[in-house]
Image (cartoon, coloured by chain):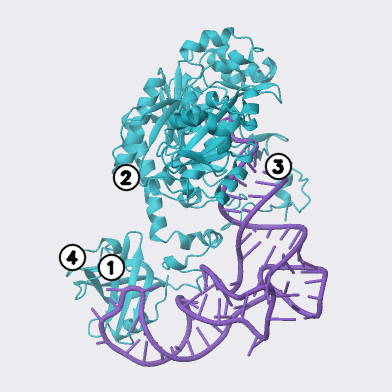
Amino acid sequence: MATRTHYCGSLTAANVGETVTLNGWVNAYRAHGQALVFVDLRDRAGIAQATFEQGSTPDPIIEAGSKLRNEDCVAVTGTVRKREKPNPKIPTGEVELVVQSMTVLSKTARLPFVPSDESNLPDEETRLKFRYLDLRRPRMQEILRIRHRVAKVTRDYFDANGFLEVETPMLCRSTPEGARDFLVPSRLQEGMWYALPQSPQLFKQILMIAGTDRYLQIVKCFRDEDPRFDRQAEFTQIDLEMAFVDREIVMQTMEGFAKTLWKQVLGVDLADFPRMTYREAMDRYGIDRPDTRYGLELVDVSELAKQTEFGVFTSALDKRRGVVKAIRVPGAAEKLTRKILDGYGTFVQQFGAGGLPFVKYVNGAFEGGVAKFLAPIAEGLVAALGLENDDAVVFGADTYAVVTKALGELRQKIAKDLDIIPKGAWNFLWVYDFPMFEYDAETGRYYSLHHPFTAPTQAETERFLAADPADVDTIESIVSDGYDMICNGSEIGGGSIRIHRQDVQKKVFSLLGLTEEQAKLKFSFLLEALSFGAPPHGGIAFGLDRLVMHMAGTENIREVIAFPKTMTGQDLMCEAPNLVDEEQLKELHVKSTARLPASV
RNA sequence: GGGGCGGUAGCUCAAUUGGUUAGAGUCCCGGACUGUCGAUCCGGUGGUUGCGGGUUCGAGUCCCGUCCGCCUCGCCA
């Protein structure tokens, strides 16, 4: 075949007069009979027009050109010529290739869809089934390129900062806590199972103990939980760890990374990242990953609510940790119709709220909703919320946990519904000072807010070691040395300074309900490693897929993964998962209890 | 495991209250055409309305079940 001398997308007026060969696919064709045919050829780099014309192109080649159809794969050779009428819509529009010879490398069968017909793109199901056609689209190629750039800049940045890329195993041991594991049966060890890594957490800590000092890995991780629009069972982390560091060093290094990434991939200069404690984030935004691109902040109006006769308020305040909070929605008195507000009422109910009291502030007075209850505190409320004419106000009244969750979620929904999120904004911030533990009254035990290897802050360590496990308030007040990097309300990275003291690690395990025996059974290697001169260390893991989602501006995570899985965990192209041979199961010492056939 | 939305030609969509032979654009096939770039013009192929059951004189439309896709709650240290 004639091999490429240029990419279609790279042709410019500078190539005029040159004889070039293009390899690509037919993006579109315009045949004007046996004497003139235009074919738009597409490759990874872009589109160029190939012209078959009598006088320049041999007749049999014109004939063959007129038979080309969408997505046929061809090689064409010819001379680059300046066009009489340039096409300003494409970058190569000033020139065309006058075809002298052509090879049809591969005719296409009847297409399930036409990749170049952006206005008639099929549903996602069809795109995923024929992913190779979908990926031919320039937009998908652009996303692949961005993803590549992110990986490349990542390796360059961390290489320049002394990090070493080290691979860690995919076949690991299953550990308690955390997400559900994907399991792999062992053939050589009958009855035993590997687990695919949820993250290389322990390996990278061991690498720090092993003197690697600075570690980086771009690595697949697996969590067998239900997907979301930005979550997939199989995903990629940019995983990092540093020894002999404190929180400040890690945060500075990682902030530098994010800035470098945005600069080199998008050409965007990011300002220094603001920092916010977990407490402040929850108080003001009702979530641990606040989207600071817009207002709609939560305001505690408990003191005012106390002065009303409104049962919903007063009974909420009678509860342990009861609060009344409000969100001012500027200028939304008309937009938030009764119907919409009813919908919001239902919306907050799924987070445990009883309903959504609301009121509108029009011409200096409250009207609608719960207006009649607010008379005694009207002045105070206007001042507390900074109300202006035509504002709407929604309230949450319940325990702190319920109000925070309900209003935090509602805040984001209102912002989307009213379309008040500024386009093109990059609001990064750090959230830190997370609690180490949350106590769950139902199971009667503590849970790690981050993971069980997260250290308490240095200042808290002795208080933590001294704390009585039965003293829930004290345990819950212990602050960890963790930090999350937030971008536009999305957690793109999370990490912490790790525990490097055996006594601290043992206490964490015991608070999590692991007996000394269980801890030894599951984590003996870690506890042992910690006893051999473990350096202080800490790190972070970024969600590569989410980073690319933000940078490419896609609606979901599947768009940034070449071969993604659906919400039911299937690969529609290769049809995984699927049945296996009975013989395979036997070798693996596995017998299925499924009602449907487990093998073919 | 729970909730919501969706599934009609290869693709994108339409089809009045349940009522004639389920239509249009596009792709594809055939024909015309020497400057198009969403080419244009003429003709044609193409349907188990996701699947199964039910109600009805009659179901794309209503009901039940099921599968698939998306979103969501739980879950995701």
Q: Which numbered marker is on residue A266?
A: 2
Left or right: where A479 falls relative to A87: right
Assign a secondary structure to mark 3.
loop
Q: Using residue A353 as the reference point, say whether residue A230 is left or right of it.
A: left
In the rendered structure, the colour chosen for chain A is cyan
Horizontal side of A551 relative to A402 (left or right) equals left
Element carrying mark 2: helix
Q: Chain of mark 1?
A: A
In whole angstroms, how far apart are the C-alphas of marks 3 and 2?
48 Å
Q: CA distance from mark 4 to mark 2?
A: 27 Å
Circles 3 and 2 on the same subunit = yes
Q: How many marks?
A: 4
From the viewer's perspective, is the residue at label 4 or at label 2 nearer? 2
Residue beneath disc 3: A588
Contact check, label 3 and label 4, Cβ < 8 Å: no
Residues at discs 2 and 1 in contact (Cβ within 8 Å): no
When the figure is inspected, residue A541 is found, relative to residue A553, above or below; the finding is: above
Contact flag, marks 4 and 2 (Cβ < 8 Å): no
Badge 1 marks a residue whose secondary structure is strand
What residue would you read off at disc 4?
A13
Mark 2 or mark 1: which is in front? 2
Chain B shade in the render: purple
Amino acid found under the numbered disc labelled 2: Leu
Picture residue at 36% right of the left edge, 35% below the top: A258
> For residue A398, which quarter of the picture?
top right
Sequence-first tag of 4 and 2: 4
Residue on which the image places disc 1 = A21
